[in-house]
Amino acid sequence: MLALADDARAAIDATKAETAGSLSIGALETIDSAKLPGWLADFQAVHPNIDIRLKIAGSGELSRRLGEGEIDVAFCFDRPGASEPDERFARRPVAAEPLVLIAPPGENRADVDLGELAEKRFVATETGCVYRAMVDTAFTEAGLGGPKLAAEAGSIDAIAGLVAAGAGFGLVPRLAVAAALDRGEVAEIAWPGPIRSAELVMIWRRRRVQPPALKLLLAAMGENFALVRPAAARPRHAASFPS
């Protein structure tokens, strides 16, 4: 009943001549700080009458809020190898961000293998996060069991700080630690796991009628923000997603 009422409100809004409205956008902390400011500034320059509310949360919480209608769209990293995608949601790739293994200063090595890393300690995000899943999967598929954990942290900044202090190694999107790498606070080592990048996606609920403000955002992302991929990323065929 709540979903039907939501669809009815969206249909009524879609009949209005004006495009004023509001958007509730959820995002991971990393994406909010490194990607969304530029994108949303461009969007608001064209649509100044749309109010935007940002909600920062982890992947699981974003999925819950999206399903319950608390947010209109979510920006997060796709989780490769996950179970069948939730059919309630449509998704669109936005960017592919390279992953890097960060280490305490002085660990300036070109590369390591998973066997060596099995002897190291890791500072990781909580279970369920895309970066943690990539580390766990890489070690499991190599028959090495799980990584040795030094600590779990709820933010990339906390992971970078713990790694800089010598607590262990961490796997994170490079965009989130670029400044720390430039300052020499952490060292960068090539990640030897099978997956070298994380795909940034936008996800929204499938509805009969999408709210006008969300339709404008979807159009803007499709027209103005080209899919950005690192040089080492393997191209994939583009796909279209229903509203």
Image (spheres, rainbow, N blue to C red):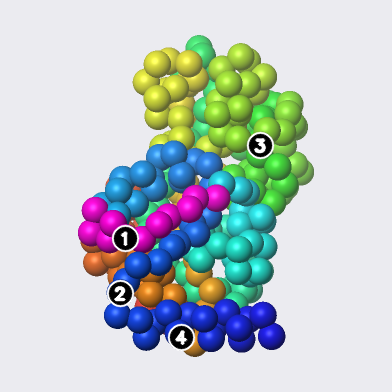
* First-in-chain label (1 vs 4): 4
The residue at the point 56 percent across, 34 percent down is 156
Q: Which residue is mark 2?
A: 18
Query: Residue 174 in the image: x percent, y percent?
Result: 43, 36
* First-in-chain label (3 vs 2): 2
| Whether residue 30 is visible | yes
The residue at the point 30 percent across, 74 percent down is 18
* First-in-chain label (1 vs 2): 2
Label 1: how many residues lie within 10 Å, few (<14), some (14-19) or many (20+)?
some
Q: Is residue 141 above or below residue 144?
A: below
| Whether residue 139 is visible | no
**Amino acid marked by disc 1:** Asn
Q: Nearer the viewer, mark 3 or mark 2?
A: 2
Q: Nearer the viewer, mark 4 or mark 2?
A: 2
Specify whether residue 52 is painted magenta: yes
Query: Residue 104 in the image: x percent, y percent?
Result: 56, 17
Residue range of the region highlighted in magenta in the rendering? 45-55
Of 181 and 48, the residue lying toward us: 48
Q: Which residue is mark 4?
A: 11
Q: Is the residue under label 2 in contact with that under label 1 (CB below 8 Å)?
A: yes
Q: Is residue 67 above or below residue 35?
A: below
Which dot marks residue 174? Answer: none
**Amino acid marked by disc 3:** Gly
Q: Is the residue under label 4 in contact with that under label 3 (CB below 8 Å)?
A: no
Q: Which residue is mark 3?
A: 154
Q: Which residue is mark 1?
A: 49
Specify whether residue 117 is painted magenta: no
* First-in-chain label (1 vs 3): 1
